[in-house]
Image (cartoon, rainbow, N blue to C red):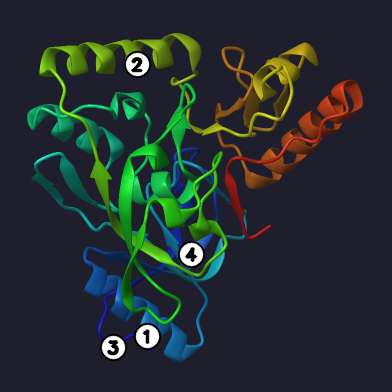
Amino acid sequence: MFEKIKIEENVPLSKYTSIKIGGPAKYLYNAKSSQDLQIALQEAKAAGINTLVIGAGSNLIFSDKGFDGLVIRNLIKYIKVEDDLMSVGAGNNLNEVVTAQTKYGLGDLEFLAGIPGNIGGAVWMNAGSRKIAIGNYVKEVEYLDEFFNKKTISGPDSEFGYRKSIFQDKKYYITGCVLNLDYAEPALVQKNIGDNILHKQETQDLKYPSAGCVFKNPMHELTAAQMIEECQLKGKKIGGLEVSSKHANYIINTGKGKAEDFVILTSLIKQQVRDTFNVQLEFEIQMIGF
């Protein structure tokens, strides 16, 4: 079936998500180059097998039944800098990129410090923190189109919005991007990085596995976290999952949490917020297999 790639079978997806939830992937493959990714997608298509490309799994919830197909981990890594342009592979960790910018006398990406994700996923969802998002700095994105051909698209054409990009609506597979950054004093950049990490430690629950913020902030004077807190849901627990007492938009895995627990707990949160504020919360995370 798979002639050109080496796959693993029946791999627990809980190993590859930051919240440590998910049943098995029927097949799993680690793609370390765009060519690896092309070949895997082509072979799966030829065999009639469903595919899913993932990054660091920091905003993913897999169902307890897992994924009946091929999960491809995007591990394409490279960092190249020319003047104020930084080319980055989709599989590079955000903290690797933040560290690299400092090495080359560049700045702007300090807000990504401490976020446990990869560049590909960050671009896909236009990840951000404290009202800044990565899309502000994307010059172009390299990707495979629906026919697995290598393409590039400009930052403006990527249609970045609040936790949104064109890649969520198209069958495109991000392989890397070019970031347009400003020159900055390394000492100041290091200070900003430290400040951002400290802020996350003080305001976010990093002690337990989680998928980060579960819900998008609605068009309302209150954030999603504030609404959930107003509903007195901090500390609410279903099975092994619990609404963080430190940050109400975090659901933490305190033990052997299951996807079923997540569905029940988030349904309760959405219902109470809707009843209290007449607001429909939308997921910031991706739910696969539900």
Q: Which is more toward the observer, 25 or 141?
A: 141
- Residue at position x 70%, y 30% in the image: 218
Percent position of residue 225, x then y: 66, 20
- Specify the quadrant of the image occupied by residue 128: top left
Residue 92: in sight, yes or no?
no
Name the residue carrying label 3. Answer: 3
Which amino acid, by three-letter code, is at mark 4?
A: Ala
Q: Secondary structure at mark 4?
A: strand
Name the residue carrying label 1. Answer: 43
Q: Are marks 1 and 3 in contact (CB under 8 Å)?
A: yes
Name the residue carrying label 4. Answer: 25
Earlier-in-chain disc, 1 versus 2: 1
Say how many tags the image has. 4
Q: Are marks 2 and 3 in contact (CB under 8 Å)?
A: no
- Specify the quadrant of the image occupied by residue 285: top right
> Separation of disc 1 and disc 4 at Cα?
17 Å
Residue 135 left/right relative to 195: right
- Residue at position x 31%, y 55% in the image: 140
Earlier-in-chain disc, 4 versus 3: 3
Which amino acid, by three-letter code, is at mark 2?
A: Asn
- Residue at position x 16%, y 22% in the image: 184
User: Which mark is nearer the camera, 1 or 4?
Assistant: 1
Which amino acid, by three-letter code, is at mark 1?
A: Glu
Q: Are marks 4 and 3 in contact (CB under 8 Å)?
A: no
Which amino acid, by three-letter code, is at mark 3?
A: Glu
- Specify the quadrant of the image occupied by residue 216: top right
Earlier-in-chain disc, 1 versus 3: 3
Percent position of residue 126, x then y: 46, 43
User: Which mark is nearer the camera, 1 or 2?
Assistant: 2
Percent position of residue 220, x then y: 74, 23
